[in-house]
Amino acid sequence: MNLSFARSWVRRLLMGAVLLILASVWILLGAMPVSAASWGADFTYAEISDQDFSGQDLHAASFAAAEARRTNFQGADLSAAIFTKGVFAGADFTGADLSRVLADRVVFEGSNLTNAVLTEMTATTTSFYLVEITGADFTDAILDRYQVAKLCERAEGVNPTTGVSTRDSLGCRD
């Protein structure tokens, strides 16, 4: 009986150690640093200025009221993301997918939207002051009339992904 009690005790001890190791691995794999952000991530009210999100899948992420100055989003998938009241001054969105983004009351001042896809974006009461838009596609985007007029003053290029000219996508008059 002592031998069977000892075996039972050792078996329970080993099983507990295995469970502890598996739980530790699960927790470590579940942790998501900023550099590994992914689909549906939540950066609401986050301070993410000067971070690098280039090439990441941030589809349907929330950046509502985020402070993202000079943040790198080059080539990132930001489709269907929420940018409401966010500050993206000086951010780099070169070649990024911003289609179907909700960007009301957002500050994009001094940002780079070169070759970005902004189709079906809703950007009301949003500032595009001094934004680089060469090759950007704004097809079916909802923008304030004043912003469209200002963007048309410097609109040029053709988006390499969609093949649509920036001027045509904004509805600029020649």
Image (cartoon, grey):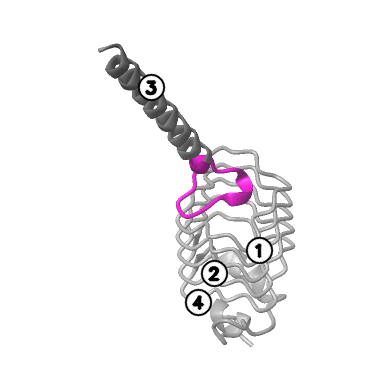
Residue at image mark 1:
93
The CA distance from mark 2 to mark 4 is: 7 Å
> Which image quarter holds the N terminus?
top left
Residue type at numbered disc 2: Leu
Which residue lies under the disc numbered 3? Answer: 10
* CA distance separating discs 2 and 3: 62 Å
User: Is 156 on the left or on the right of 16, as rendered?
Assistant: right
* Residue 5: % across, % down: 29, 15
Q: Residue at x 60, y 67 (%)?
A: 96
CB-based contact (under 8 Å), mark 4 and mark 3: no
Task: Check disc 3 and report its element: helix, strand or loop.
Answer: helix
For this rendering, which residue is in front, 53 or 140? Answer: 53
Side of 169 where 152 appears, left or right: right
Which residue is at 54% across, 69% downward?
A: 118
**In the picture shown, does residue 159 fall above or below 72?**
below
Of mark 3 and mark 1, the one earlier in the sequence is 3
Query: What percent of the width, then of the height, locates residue 167?
Result: 62, 82
Asked if 46 appears above or below 124 in the picture, the reply is: above
Q: Please check the rendered image and state whether residue 25 is part of the magenta-colored stretch, yes or no.
A: no
Q: Is residue 52 above or below residue 146?
A: above
What is the spatial separation of the Cα atoms under label 4 and label 1, in whole angstroms?
17 Å
Secondary structure, magenta segment, majority class:
loop
